[in-house]
Amino acid sequence: MDKPYVVGITGGIATGKTAATDFLAEQGALVLDADVESRALTAENGEALPMIREKFGDDVFNEDGTLNRRALGDIVFASEEKRHALEGILHPMIQHSLIQKIRQAGQDGVPFLFLSVPLLFETGMDALCDETWCLTLDPAEQLDRVIERDGLSRSEAEARIKSQMSLEEKASRANVLIRTNRSMDATRAELAGLLRDLRRRNG
């Protein structure tokens, strides 16, 4: 098999992507996650740290040399230019790693996999996908979730949401919409049905 059937999963911040992909992984599906790749690149001794230090300076690092994610977040979400600078460091490295893992999955005979990328459409990584699923919910509820989950002020939460493509735009580009403004059990039931259909089509 040259390439597995790739399903891209995306959505806005705090729309439930992690809960959804955790469930799919529990059901035995292979999930490749851009956020996991990003954390690895920026963890202690991560490959991206020297470039981040060169671009943003010592102020975004703790005394032990680890990345101060909150300090970096405060900078990049306050400045579109700085955010693009960070993305310019991370996105090519993340994409390269994910492409390598997709190829390896094909060599291993994996029939399909999920590619979880928050900025799937923004980065053009939907070009790697055969279909795309988008998790979405009401914007007011999304804002409340971001404030509660990340302990941010309303203005900080709004800045993070506005740094991404609007949920409406993402939804218009996706093949499948999954609404998460309901119980997790209901979302899991829908995901299970979609997964059964995917297995039937790509067994």
Image (cartoon, rainbow, N blue to C red):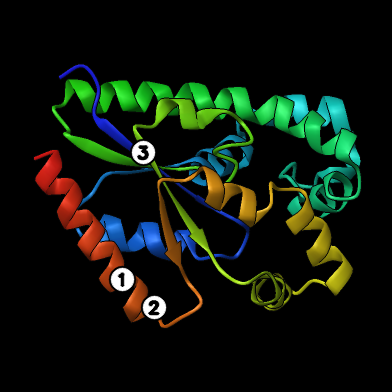
Label 2 residue SS: helix
Q: What element carries label 1?
A: helix
Viewer-side label of 2, 3: 3
Out of 53 and 180, give the one closest to the viewer.
180
| Residue type, mark 3 in image | Glu
The residue at 91%/43% (across/down) is: 79
Residue 87 in view (yes/no): yes
Report the amino acid beneath label 1.
Arg
Which element type, helix, strand or loop, lies under badge 3? strand
Asked whether the residues under the numbered discs 2 and 1 touch, taking CB atoms below 8 Å apart as contact, a structural biologist would say yes
Q: Which one is nearer the viewer's eye here, 178 or 29?
A: 178
* Residue lying at 70% horizontally and 70% vertically, measured from the top left: 150
Q: Is residue 4 above or below residue 26?
A: above
In-front residue for pair 152/123: 123
Q: Quadrant of residue 183?
A: bottom left
Q: How crowded is mark 1: few (under 14 residues within 10 Å), some or many (20 or more)?
A: some
Which percent across, then down, holds residue 33?
A: 44, 44
Along the line of sight, the residue nearer the viewer: 185 or 97: 185
- Residue 152 vs residue 132: left or right? right
**Residue 151 appears at what percent x and percent y?**
75, 74
Q: Mark 3 points at which residue?
A: 131
| Residue 25, quarter of the rendered image | bottom left
The furthest residue to the bottom: 183
Residue indicated by mark 2 = 184
Q: Nearer the viewer, mark 1 or mark 3?
A: 3
- What is the residue that sits farthest to the top in this orientation? 2
Q: Mark 1 points at which residue?
A: 188
Q: Sequence-wise, which precedes: disc 2 or disc 3?
A: 3
**Callout 2 touching callout 3 (CB < 8 Å):** no
Query: Separation of disc 1 and disc 3 at Cα?
Result: 19 Å
Q: Give left or right: position of 37 versus 90.
A: left
Spatial separation of the CA atoms under disc 2 and disc 3? 23 Å
